[in-house]
Image (cartoon, coloured by chain):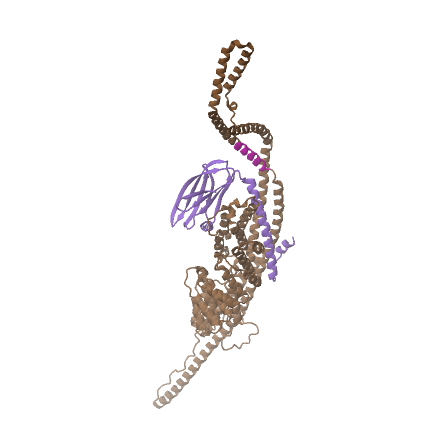
C-alpha cells in the first residue's frame, strides 16, 4: 500500500542510487521465479485437465532447414473439420527457419484413425507456393504427436 | 582533463562490447549438432528465437518437471537433449535477466559429476553472468577455472569473454594476446579488432592502438553491426587525435564515419572541430550546418547551434553570427519549454502509458520501435533517455512486470473456467458412474470366470503334450455311444452267457470308437490347440475392451476429481504473485519516471548553460558588428572630409584663377554621406545584467569541448 502511494506521488528530481536499482532488480528476479513456477504448475494442470493422454493429439509445424521456405499461412482439418489456422508473422517465420517448432494445435480425439488435411501457402525463392496434403493419424492409447514439415517442395508428416 | 575522458570512454566502450553472439545464435546452438528429438524442446526454441523467454523457460520447466517425475526417464524423447535443455534454461534465464537463478543452476552443474566439456561450458556461462553483472573479480576467478576441452560452440566466445574479463581486471597484455588470435575470426569481425585496439590503448601502446583502430576503421563489410563497429573505431580514433592536437589526422578518421549511422552526429561535430582547429572555419561550416538541421533533441545538434555562429564570427561575419546566436536562443527556449512539458507529462504518468502499448513489442526491435511513438511531450526525449543502461534495464523490467501482470490476470480467469468445466463434468458423470460401475462389476466377474476356464484348458493341453490322454479329446457323440455301450454291457452281463453274439457286437462297436479316438488323437489335439488360439484372440480383444473401459472410467473420474486442492493452491499463489507484481510495477514505474525526469532536468541545465553562452556571444557579435560598421562610417567620413578639403582647396585655386580671369563663383558644397544601413540591433536582444559594455576583441564564447561518443549499452 505504501509503495502504491509512493508510485502515485509526484515525481521529483530525486537521486536514484545504484543500490536502489539493483535492489529492485533482485525483487523483480524473485517474482519472475515465482510466476514461472505458477506457469509450470498451470501447464501441468492444463494438460491433465484439458488434454488427458488417452485423447491428446498435438500437431507441430517445422520448416526444413536451409529450404528457404517462408510460410505465410497454414490450415489444418481433421476428419474434414477445420481444427486450426495460422497466419505467420515475420518473427515466427524467422524462428521456424532457425529450427524452432510451432505447436499449432492441441486437442482431443478418439482412439482410431483420423484423416489430417493440411493446406499451406507461402513463398520460396520469390515464387509463391500453395499445397494441400493428407495424412492418416492413428490415435492410440498414449498422446499422439504429428510433425508437419514444410519445405516449399511439399508437405511432410512424421508421427512421434 | 579531456584526455582522461577519452581513456574512460575507450574503457567503457571496450568493456561494453558483449560477445557478438546474438540471442538467436545462442539459442540455435542449443539444438546441438543432431536433429531435434523432442518436439516440445523445439517449441521452447521457437519461443526463444522470438525472444519470448518467459514462454520458452516455462515450457522447458514443464518438460523437465515431467521428465524428472518419470520412472524411466531414459525412454523419454527429452533424454537426448537433456544437457542442452538444462543449459538452455540457464541461457534463457540470462536473457530474461534472471541472473540469480541462472547462476545457481549453473553452479549446480559445475559441482555435479559431469564431463569436462560440460563443466567448462557451465563455468563459461557463470563467468559471463559475473561479467554482465559488473563483478570482474568473480568473473576472472570463474573463467580461470576453465581447463581442458572447451565445447566447439564456444571456440570463439570463450577466449573473447576471457579477454574482456582480463581487460576489466587491467590484465591488458593477456587480453591483447588473446585478441590478436581472434582478430581475423569472421564471426567476430570488428568486435575483436576493436577490443584489441582498446586494450592496446589501455596498455599504453598508443601507436599500436591507433594502428589497430585504423585497421578496424577500414573494414569492408555489408553487415550493419560490423559497419557500426567500423564507425565507432573511426569516431574514437578521431576524437582521440583531436584531443592530442592532431586535427588534420583526426579529420581523416572522422570523415570515414557514415553520414547515416548511429555515430554520424558526433562525427559531423568532430569534423567541424577538426577543421576549426586548423583555422578552416569556412569549411567547418559545411558539416556543422548539415548537423544543425538534424533532430534538435540530439546533444550534438544542440551543441552545434553554438558552433555555426562561432565559425561565422571567426570569419568576421558578425552580423550573421549575431542572427544565428539569436536563432539558437529561440531554439533553446523552445526546447526548454518542450523539456518542461515532457517533465510535466511524465509526472502525470503519461510516459509509462505511452511505452506499454502492445504494438511496440510486436517486432523484435522494440527498442527502436519506441522511437517511432507518436510525437508527444512525454516521448520527445525518449531516444536520448534510452541511451542510459539503467534506464533500458529498468524499462525492460517494467515490460516484464506488465507482461506478468497480464498473464496472472488471465490465469485467474482460466482457473474460474476450469472450476466450471469440473462442475459440468461432475454433474454429468456423477449420476452415470454408479450404474456403469455395477454393470462393469457383473461383466468383470463373468469375464474372470471365462478366463479361468480358458487357463484350465491351456494347462491340460500343455500336460497332454507330455502325457497324451485320449479320453480328454473324445467327442460328445462318442462319449454318449460309449456310455450306451457300457450300459448295454452291464445288462448283457446280468443275463448270462447266452448273449455272446450280442456281447461281441458291442465289443466291436466299442473297438471302432476307441480306434477312432486313438488314431485321430493327434488331429484332434491340433484342432483343440487351434481352438484355444482362436479363443485367445477373443480373450485379447476382450482384454482390450476391458482396458479401454477401465481407462475411460478412470479418465471420467480423473476429469473432475482431485483438482480442488491444486486449483485452490494455484489461486492463492496467483493472488499473492499478482499483488507483488502490482507493487513492483508501481515501484519500477516510479523509478523509470525519476530516471527520466533526472535525465531531462540534466538536459535542461545544459540548455540553460548554452542559452547563457549564446546571449553573451550574440551581444558580443552585435557589438563587434556595430563597431565594424562605425569604423567603416568613420573611414567614410574621414574620406569625405578629405574630399571636402580637396574640393575647397580646388575652389580656392579656381577662385584665385577666376579673380585673375573675372569668372562667376559656382556651388561646391558636397552633400554629407548617408549611411546605407540602419542600426541592426533588434529590440528583442537582451543584454545580461552586469554586462561590462566593453567587449573583448574577438568572440570568446564557444561551444563546450566536444564530447566523446557514449558507450554502447551492455
Q: Can you name the residue that lies furthest to the right here?
A: A2
Residue B233 spot, x, y in % from top left: 46, 66
Q: Nearer the viewer, residue A141 or B324?
A: A141
In percent of the image, x 43 and y 78: which residue is there?
A: B673
Q: Nearer the viewer, residue B614 or B47?
A: B47
Q: Nearer the viewer, residue A136 or B548?
A: B548
Q: Is residue B474 above or below residue B408?
A: above
Regarding residue A116, the answer to whether it shows in the image is yes
In percent of the image, x 56 and y 36: which residue is there?
A: B555
Indicate whether residue B544 is drawn in magenta: yes
Please give the letter of the chain rendered in purple.
A
Magenta segment boundaries in residue numbering: B543-560
Count of numbered circles in the view? 0
Residue B273 spot, x, y in % from top left: 47, 71
SS majority, magenta: helix
Q: Is residue A58 above or below residue B157?
A: above
Q: Can you name the residue that lies furthest to the front here?
A: B497
Indicate whether residue B557 is drawn in magenta: yes
Q: Can you name the residue that lies furthest to the bottom here?
A: B660
Q: Is residue B54 above or below residue B639?
A: above
Please give the letter of the chain rendered in brown.
B
Residue B446 spot, x, y in % from top left: 57, 27
Regarding residue B193, the answer to whether it shows in the image is no
Amino acid at each position: 500500500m505504501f509503495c502504491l502511494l509512493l508510485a502515485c506521488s509526484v515525481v521529483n528530481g530525486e537521486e536514484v542510487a545504484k543500490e536502489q536499482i539493483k535492489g529492485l532488480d533482485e525483487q523483480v528476479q524473485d517474482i519472475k521465479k515465482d510466476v514461472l513456477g505458477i506457469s509450470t504448475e498451470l501447464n501441468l494442470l492444463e494438460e491433465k485437465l484439458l488434454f488427458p493422454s488417452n485423447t491428446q493429439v498435438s500437431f507441430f509445424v517445422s520448416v526444413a532447414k536451409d529450404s528457404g521456405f517462408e510460410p505465410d499461412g497454414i490450415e489444418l482439418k481433421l476428419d474434414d473439420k477445420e481444427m486450426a489456422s495460422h497466419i505467420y508473422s515475420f518473427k515466427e517465420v524467422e524462428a521456424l527457419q532457425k529450427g524452432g517448432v510451432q505447436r499449432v494445435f492441441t486437442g482431443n480425439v478418439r482412439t482410431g484413425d483420423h484423416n489430417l488435411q493440411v493446406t499451406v501457402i507461402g513463398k520460396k525463392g520469390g515464387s509463391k507456393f500453395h499445397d494441400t496434403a493428407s495424412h492418416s493419424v492413428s490415435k492410440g492409447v498414449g498422446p499422439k504427436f504429428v510433425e508437419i514439415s514444410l519445405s516449399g517442395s511439399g508437405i511432410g508428416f512424421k508421427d512421434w | 582533463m579531456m584526455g582522461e575522458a577519452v581513456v574512460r570512454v575507450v574503457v567503457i566502450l571496450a568493456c561494453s562490447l558483449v560477445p557478438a553472439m546474438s540471442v538467436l545464435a545462442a539459442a540455435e546452438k542449443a539444438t546441438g549438432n543432431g536433429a531435434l528429438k523432442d518436439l516440445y524442446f523445439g517449441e521452447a526454441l521457437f519461443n526463444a528465437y522470438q525472444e519470448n523467454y518467459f514462454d520458452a523457460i516455462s515450457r522447458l520447466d514443464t518438460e523437465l518437471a515431467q521428465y524428472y517425475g518419470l520412472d524411466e526417464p531414459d525412454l523419454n524423447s527429452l533424454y537426448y537433449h537433456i544437457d542442452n535443455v538444462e543449459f538452455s534454461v540457464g541461457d534463457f534465464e540470462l536473457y530474461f535477466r534472471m541472473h540469480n537463478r541462472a547462476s545457481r543452476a549453473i553452479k549446480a552443474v559445475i559441482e555435479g559429476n559431469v564431463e569436462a566439456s560440460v563443466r567448462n561450458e557451465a563455468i563459461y556461462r557463470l563467468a559471463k553472468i559475473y561479467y554482465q553483472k559488473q563483478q570482474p573479480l568473480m568473473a576472472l576467478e570463474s573463467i580461470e577455472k576453465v581447463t581442458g576441452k572447451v565445447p566447439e560452440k564456444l571456440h570463439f566466445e570463450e577466449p573473447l569473454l576471457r579477454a574482456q574479463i582480463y581487460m576489466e581486471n587491467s590484465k591488458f597484455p593477456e587480453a591483447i594476446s588473446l585478441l590478436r588470435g581472434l582478430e581475423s575470426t569472421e564471426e567476430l569481425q570488428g568486435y575483436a579488432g576493436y577490443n584489441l585496439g582498446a586494450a592496446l590503448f589501455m596498455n599504453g601502446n598508443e601507436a599500436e592502438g591507433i594502428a589497430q583502430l585504423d585497421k578496424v576503421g577500414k573494414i569492408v563489410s555489408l553487415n550493419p553491426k560490423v559497419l557500426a563497429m567500423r564507425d565507432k573505431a573511426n569516431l574514437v580514433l578521431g576524437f582521440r587525435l583531436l584531443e592530442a592536437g592532431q586535427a588534420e589526422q583526426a579529420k581523416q578518421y572522422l570523415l570515414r564515419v557514415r553520414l547515416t549511422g548511429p555515430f554520424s552526429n558526433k562525427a559531423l561535430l568532430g569534423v567541424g572541430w577538426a577543421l576549426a582547429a586548423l583555422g578552416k572555419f569556412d569549411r567547418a561550416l559545411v558539416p556543422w550546418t548539415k548537423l544543425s538541421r538534424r533532430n534538435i533533441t540530439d546533444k550534438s545538434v544542440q551543441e552545434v547551434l553554438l558552433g555555426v555562429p562561432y565559425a561565422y564570427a571567426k570569419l568576421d561575419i558578425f552580423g550573421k553570427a549575431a542572427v544565428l546566436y539569436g536563432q539558437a536562443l529561440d531554439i533553446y527556449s523552445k526546447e526548454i519549454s518542450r523539456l518542461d512539458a515532457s517533465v510535466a507529462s511524465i509526472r502525470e504518468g503519461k510516459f509509462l502509458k505511452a511505452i506499454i502499448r502492445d504494438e511496440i513489442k510486436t517486432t523484435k526491435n522494440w527498442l527502436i520501435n519506441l522511437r517511432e511513438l507518436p510525437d508527444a511531450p512525454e516521448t520527445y526525449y525518449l531516444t536520448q533517455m534510452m541511451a542510459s543502461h539503467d534506464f533500458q534495464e529498468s524499462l525492460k523490467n517494467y515490460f516484464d512486470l506488465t507482461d506478468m501482470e497480464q498473464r496472472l490476470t488471465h490465469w485467474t480467469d482460466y482457473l474460474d473456467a476450469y472450476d466450471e468445466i469440473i462442475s459440468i463434468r461432475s454433474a454429468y458423470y456423477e449420476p452415470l458412474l454408479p450404474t456403469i460401475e455395477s454393470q462393469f462389476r457383473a461383466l468383470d466377474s463373468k469375464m474372470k470366470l471365462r478366463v479361468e476356464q480358458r487357463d484350465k484348458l491351456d494347462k491340460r493341453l500343455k500336460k497332454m503334450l507330455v502325457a497324451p490322454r485320449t479320453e480328454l479329446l473324445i467327442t460328445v457323440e462318442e462319449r454318449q455311444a460309449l456310455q450306451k455301450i457300457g450300459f448295454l454291457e452291464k445288462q448283457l452281463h446280468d443275463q448270462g452267457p447266452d448273449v455272446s453274439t450280442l456281447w461281441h457286437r458291442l465289443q466291436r462297436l466299442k473297438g471302432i470308437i476307441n480306434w477312432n479316438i486313438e488314431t485321430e488323437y493327434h488331429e484332434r489335439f491340433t484342432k483343440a490347440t487351434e481352438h484355444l488360439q482362436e479363443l485367445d484372440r477373443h480373450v485379447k480383444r476382450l482384454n482390450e475392451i476391458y482396458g479401454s473401459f477401465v481407462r475411460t472410467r478412470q479418465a471420467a473420474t480423473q476429469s473432475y476429481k482431485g483438482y480442488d486442492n491444486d486449483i485452490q493452491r494455484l489461486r492463492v499463489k496467483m493472488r499473492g504473485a499478482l499483488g507483488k507484481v502490482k507493487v513492483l510495477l508501481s515501484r519500477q514505474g516510479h523509478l523509470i519516471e525519476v530516471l527520466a525526469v533526472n535525465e531531462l532536468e540534466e538536459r535542461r541545465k545544459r540548455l540553460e548553460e548554452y542559452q547563457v553562452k549564446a546571449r553573451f556571444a550574440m551581444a558580443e557579435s552585435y557589438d563587434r558588428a556595430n563597431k565594424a560598421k562605425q569604423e567603416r562610417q568613420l573611414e567614410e567620413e574621414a574620406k569625405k572630409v578629405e574630399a571636402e578639403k580637396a574640393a575647397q582647396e580646388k575652389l580656392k585655386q579656381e577662385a584665385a584663377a577666376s579673380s585673375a580671369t573675372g569668372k562667376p563663383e559656382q556651388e561646391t558644397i558636397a552633400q554629407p554621406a548617408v549611411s546605407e544601413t540602419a542600426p541592426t540591433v533588434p529590440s528583442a536582444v537582451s543584454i545580461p545584467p552586469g554586462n561590462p559594455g566593453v567587449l573583448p576583441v574577438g568572440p570568446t564564447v564557444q561551444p563546450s569541448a566536444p564530447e566523446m561518443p557514449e558507450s554502447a549499452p551492455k
